[in-house]
Amino acid sequence: MITLVLSLADALRYRFTVSPVGEAVQLARAMALPTAFAEGAPAAWLRRHDLARKRLEKERDLRPLMMLMSAGAYYPDFLTPYPQAGLIDLEPELAEIRATPATRARSEIDSTLAQLGTIDPEVEQLLRSRDAVGYLTELLEALWDALIAPFWPSVRDVLERDILYRSRLLSSGGLSGLFGGLAPLITLDGRDLRIACNGFEANRALDGRGIELRPSAFIWPYAAASLDELRPAMVVYPSRGLASLFASPDCKQAALANLIGATRANILTTLDEPLHTSGLARLLGRSAGNIADHLKVLHGCRLVTRARLGRHVIYSRTSLGDELVADAVPSIRAGVVPGSVSRR
């Protein structure tokens, strides 16, 4: 259990981030610890993309990365740099990893390997070499290209939707509202923010450095925290809406479809959380132009509302739209495909 003691300044200094390389590291950890991640979102993702994974394992020697990811509760901090504000791009993060000072990399790799009883001599030699950082960066990039990059727009949509949802909770209910739905992995008790991290104990007063909140598609059923003496603490938590990464886009609700048309029914039922046109197009397997045309009709019928958020126009169901979905589609929130993501 990690306990972060928040001050008033910490409660006011927060930001949400998305980290592409952080998602790659989480997936690598699930690959390295198949027993610990036998259930949950990363296991479901790896099963779904098993052929791509086997191809990657055949083409690249992943043992150095897998050894670090499976050594224990700690793995090198330099592999998960703090995301830069306003950027959701892999390359800047990989560049930061490549620029890790040799002394820091050596120290963190040594600390990681110290958790192991026995070490493969060949892998140890690679990890203790001068080229270790560059080699590990290449492996992370290869894993990203094989298992995440083709699907990143959809994954990013899920993460951005989670941030929008939790930002609204924060504005309406403060920190208690924000963390209320994350128990028992993350709980807020007065000034103490507790993160359940198996095998790791720490108690840290943040002293005004603030906190960064990062949703992840590949960490459930766990949560994690990163502590740095000079930077805000980072809390990594399971994103909402993961079922959309596994659900079939062809699941149409007949009653509602007969009333307003199949595509508009799919759009309306998909908007359980606000989303932009491109995200809807990816989820439903249609062109953005086609989705935009249907959204225009739904907006004209007062079934959806829209608001600009950054570079996107975000669509949400109106109360009328909610009532229509609730009446015609009583089972819409079932969500998860059987066997793909199961809860403990």
Image: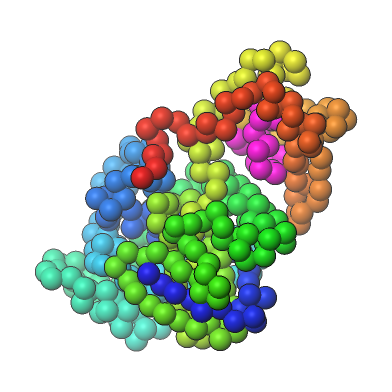
Number of numbered discs overlaid on the protein picture: 0
Quadrant occupied by the C terminus = top left
Asked which colour scheme the image uses, the reply is rainbow
Magenta span has 121?
no
Residue 219 drawn above or below residue 264: below
Quadrant in the picture for residue 126:
bottom left
Left/right placement of residue 335 relative to residue 118 reads: right
Left/right placement of residue 212 relative to residue 97 reads: right
Quadrant occupied by the N terminus = bottom left
Quadrant in the picture for residue 320:
top right
Can the viewer see residue 95 in this picture?
Answer: no
Residue at image x 48%, y 62%?
186
**Nearer the observer, 209 or 95:** 209
Query: Residue 290: image x %, image y %?
Result: 74, 28
Query: Residue 180: image x %, image y %?
Result: 56, 57
Residue 198 drawn above or below residue 271: below
Left/right placement of residue 72 relative to residue 230 reads: left
Residue 260 drawn above or below residue 167: above
Query: Residue 121: image x %, image y %?
Result: 12, 69
Can the viewer see residue 110 in this picture?
Answer: yes
Residue at image x 41%, y 39%?
341
Secondary structure mainly formed by the magenta segment: helix
Chain part drawn in magenta: 266-283
**Nearer the observer, 258 or 324:** 324
Magenta span has 280?
yes
Residue at image x 77%, y 28%?
294
